[in-house]
Image (spheres, helix red, strand yellow):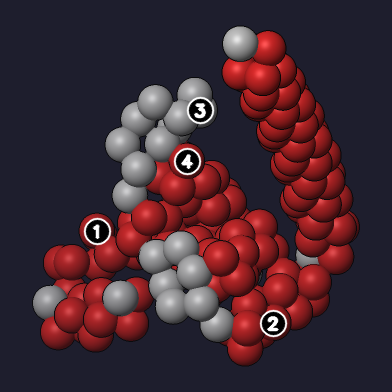
Amino acid sequence: MVYLLIVISIFVPPLWFFTVPYILYLTITREKRREKYADDGMIWESGGLLGSGVVDIDRAVSLYRKSCNMGSAKGCFFLARMYQLGKGVPESRIDYDKYIEKSKELDPDVYRQLQDVIDESDAEADRLLQDEIESEKQQADEFLSSLVGLTQHRYQTRHRI
């Protein structure tokens, strides 16, 4: 887009007054915009800060991709997660590996920090799942023991009469 503006400005010199400041703006704010795109992608993926807004996975993927192409480790990491989970894009181990590696190369500290958060979240999800399974087993055992007790009680009552 910048190149198109430059070409148009060459042929229409008065546009220099608009294109030069705009190109400077794009250059100066590049780093801030790439992180903003990654943050906006998270908002669109989750539905907002409280998860109560509109969820648009396609828009989130688009923003992550844009952020990653601009050099954001966070954008690459979240885009890789989308490929890993198959959210908004086809599930692909190759693309997952590609974007995870790009995230590591761009900023290893950000990658490590995000990976730690994901690992903690996965560990918590595993703990909750184990608790749920144990609770289900306990309820099933209680149900079976009450069913056995009821069956024994009926058997005993029938044979007394």
Instruction: Tell me the CA gap for discs 1 and 3.
Output: 36 Å
Q: Secondary structure at mark 2?
A: helix
Instruction: Tell me the CA gap for discs 3 and 4.
Output: 8 Å
Quarter of the picture containing the N terminus is bottom left
Front tag of 4 and 1: 4
Q: In the current view of this chain or complex, which residue is farthest to the bottom?
A: 94
Q: Secondary structure at mark 4?
A: helix
- Which residue is labeled 4 in the image? 46
Q: Is residue 27 visible?
A: no
| Disc on res. 49 | 3
For badge 1, the amino acid type reads Phe
Instruction: Tell me the CA gap for discs 4 and 1.
Output: 37 Å
Q: Is residue 97 visible?
A: yes
Residue 132 % position (x, y): 72, 34
Residue 74 % position (x, y): 66, 57
Total marks in image? 4
Q: Nearer the viewer, residue 126 or 114?
A: 126
Asked if residue 107 lies left or right of residue 139, the reply is right
- Which residue is labeled 2 in the image? 97
Q: Nearer the viewer, residue 22 or 131?
A: 131
Earlier-in-chain disc, 1 versus 3: 1
For badge 2, the amino acid type reads Asp
Front tag of 2 and 1: 2
Instruction: Tell me the CA gap for discs 4 and 2.
Output: 23 Å
Quarter of the picture containing the C terminus is top right
